Image (spheres, grey):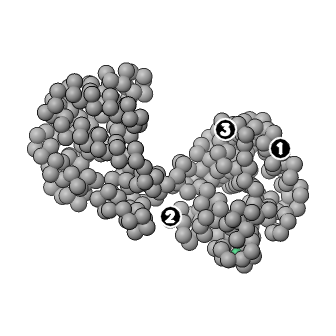
Amino acid sequence: MLGFKEILGHDQIKEHFQNAVQTGKISHAYILSGEAGMGRKSLAHAFALSLLCEKSTTDPCMQCHACRQVLSGNHPDLIHVTHEKPASIGVDDIREQINDTIMVRPYSSYYKIYIVDEAEKMTVQAQNALLKTIEEPPSYAVILLLTTNQDVFLPTILSRCVQLKLKPLRDSVVKEYLVQSLKVEESQADIYTAFARGNLGKAIHLAQAEDFKLMYEEVLHLLKHVKDADISELLDDIRRLKEDNLDIYECLDFMQMWYRDVLMYKTTKDINLLIFKDEFSTIKSMGTLSGYDGLDTILKAIDKARIRLDANVNMELAMELMLLTMKEN
Ligand SMILES: [Zn+2]
């Protein structure tokens, strides 16, 4: 768990929470929405720490009894709402863990904080049960709903919550973290950063994931041989991606970034603008084999492959059409 100071980015949300702590104007219900990996839990925990900290400044001290209780997962006034069914949060989960306990005054703090993770999984009945509580909450209650998709909430829930949306971090922030804190090599950090699209959790995951390394090797092999290999050999490569359980959409993202690099170098001759800097010589020679129109056609073919997959066209057929375009252009 981190204090606000240690959380990268999300300045507006941090300011909002810190202001609330400083002025004592705390809302009873918040929605934190954003992609998995973006930091909803970190922000919620930093807020909870700040509210419960005995020193009660805008950033938790991490030293006092209350902070230490939160850090060890044992603070009696911080409740993580759980659910038994993996796919849904039911009305009983909300009743038993929130509604039935919320009137019990906090044990050791001024606040009593509930964190509901995966709140988009609340059924309509569960949301209605929660609504009763957030319509007339006791003064000390703070409910934090964490979600990847707040569109599933009832309008009555939305209107009673402060809605805070997490935004992607700047690429430079993500890259710096990978290089400085995780000691990832610069050239690799560029690739993870490009894939993560501002999602720090995803970037960290990619930097540590074996399947990403496997995808990197296999897709790179395919791209390097796309001009000289037979289509049947290339399709064998595609089958191998599938056998290795790699996400075909991520493979397509990879290919798109690769051809963008080829186009970028052909246009600018600037190696610093490339994502795949380590593969510079291959990128350069592929740029000489294809014209601008050809590269544009290839990029469009990758888009089209993605659309075909969405439309449930047979995967191998969709890939074959794309690979033929890559060979011919
Ligand atoms: Zn403290």
Q: Secondary structure at mark 1?
A: helix
Name which quarter of the figure residue 315 lies in: top left
Query: Percent from the top left, x then y, of residue 175?
Result: 38, 61
Name which quarter of the figure residue 64 lies in: bottom right
Residue sitting at 13 percent across and 33 percent down?
A: 228
> Residue at label 2?
9
Residue sitting at 42 percent across and 64 percent down?
A: 182
> Residue at label 3?
86
Frontmost of labels 2 and 1 is 1
- The quadrant of the image that shows the C terminus is top left
Task: Give 37 or 224, whichever is nearer the viewer.
Answer: 224
Residue 159 vs 46, above or below: the answer is above
Q: Secondary structure at mark 3?
A: loop
Frontmost of labels 3 and 1 is 3
Task: Give 240 or 257, whichever is nearer the viewer.
Answer: 240
> Residue at label 1?
95
Residue sitting at 83 percent across and 44 percent down?
A: 95
6 relative to 119 in the view: left or right? left
Image quadrant of ligand 1 equals bottom right
Instruction: Give how far apart the Cα atoms at labels 2 and 1 are.
Output: 35 Å
Residue contact at pointers 3 and 2, CB within 8 angstroms: no
Frontmost of labels 3 and 2 is 3
Instruction: Give how far apart the Cα atoms at labels 3 and 1 are.
Output: 17 Å
Task: Give 178 or 142, whichever is nearer the viewer.
Answer: 178
N-terminal of the pair, mark 3 or mark 2, is 2
